[in-house]
Structures are given as C-alpha cells and as structure tokens.
Image (spheres, rainbow, N blue to C red):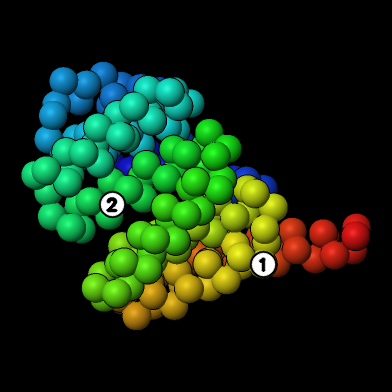
Amino acid sequence: MSFIQGYDQESLRELVDLDACAVRLAEIEAQRSLPALLERVWLLKVLGRLDEALTLADETVRQARMAGTRKDVLRARVLHATVLQFRRAHAAAEQELATCAAEAEGHRWLAIAAFAHQHHGKNAYEAGDYDTARESFKRSLFLRREAGAEDHELETALLAIEAAERRRSSQLLAG
C-alpha cells in the first residue's frame, strides 16, 4: 500500500495520508528487520517526528552496516539524509546524498543512484539552489529511463525539473 497521495507542487514533498501512516507505524513499531526500520524512519519523517526519525535513522544505518548489503547501507544513508533535509540541515544532507549518488552510480545500481539524485535535487530545491536541483532531477530522470522505470516515476522527475526551472526563472526575474 502506498501512503503517498501525490506531491506538493511548491515544496515537492510527498503528500501522505497521515492517519494511515500513524496506523502503519503502530503496526510495525516493534519490528526490528531492516525493511521495517527503514519504513519506520520514513513514517516518522513524514509524520513530522523528526527527532525520533533521526535517532532511528542513525540506528538503521548502523544495522545496515552490520547485517545488510552495500545496497542496504546506501538506502539507509539516503533515508538518513532525507531526515537531515527535513530538519533543514541542507549542507549535511547535500554531502551525504552526493556521496551516495556517486557510489551507487559507480556500482551501476541505477535505481538507487536515481533515488539519491532525486533527493539530492529536493534538498537543493529546499535550500534555494535551483540550478543544482534541476541538474540532480535531470540526472535522476536519465538514470530512471536507463533503468526502465515506470511512467509515474519518470513523471515525478519531470515535474520536479519543471518546478526547479519555474523557481529559477522567478529568482532571476526578482534578482
């Protein structure tokens, strides 16, 4: 079940069913598997419980390093960086996301690289760096196409590119 109902056109953040997210969080609260931890971090993040999300994200990265694959570690690190982004720690999130994207591309893990680039773009967008956002979104789109992603995933990247271009144009006109 997807809790994401769409994306806010201004912030590019996920629009979620908060009640369904809270119910799901309660259902998996005691689970300790890596997938459950990743899901719990995301749920805490979208519910705005950022201190809890950051603490659990740190734990999830440690668990992935101890018991997961390199792909698991990258996924956990990207999610950790998105919590930093939500906490407005944009410089730390930027560094983590750029590193994850480069590592994933180096291994040709296209889906993870696209995911990292998309979030790198969202972080830059929120920080007001619309050129970087646009380039990251374009890279995500390219990688998603190369990986054979579904149309809705491509559309998400295209909408993000358009939003960054709109913001950049507005910024140039105002400046």
Residue ID for mark 2:
75
Q: Classify 10 Å Cα crowding around label 1: few (below 14), some (14-19), many (20 and above).
A: some
Vertical placement of 40 versus 22: above or below?
A: below
Q: Earlier in the sequence, mark 2 or mark 1?
A: 2
Give the residue at x 44% y 61%. 98
Question: Which one is in front, 153 or 52?
Answer: 52
Observer-nearest of 138 and 128: 128
Q: Amino acid at mark 1?
A: Asp
The kind of residue tagged 2 is Arg
Q: Is residue 74 left or right of residue 4?
A: left
Q: Which residue is mark 1?
A: 131
Q: On the image, which quarter does residue 17 sit in?
A: top left
Horizontally, is 31 left or right of 120 in the view?
left
Decide: few, some or many residues near mark 2? Use Cα within 10 Å; few <14, some 14-19, many ≥20: many
Residue at x 13%, y 29% (from the top left corner):
32
Q: Residue at x 24, y 73 (%)?
A: 107
Is 118 situated above or below 149?
above
Q: Residue at x 26, y 19 (%)?
A: 26
Looking at the picture, tell me which residue is in the foreground, 175 or 42. Answer: 175
At which x and y percent is residue 71? 20, 58
The disc label shown at residue 12, or none: none
Which secondary structure, mark 2?
helix
- Residue 20 at least partly seen: no
Q: Quadrant of the N terminus?
A: top left
Residue situated in front as seen by the camera: 137 or 92:
92
Tell me, yes or no, whether the two marked residues, 2 and 1, touch with CB atoms within 8 Å.
no
For mark 1, give the secondary structure: helix
Image quadrant holding the C terminus, namely: bottom right
Mark pair 2, 1: CA separation? 25 Å
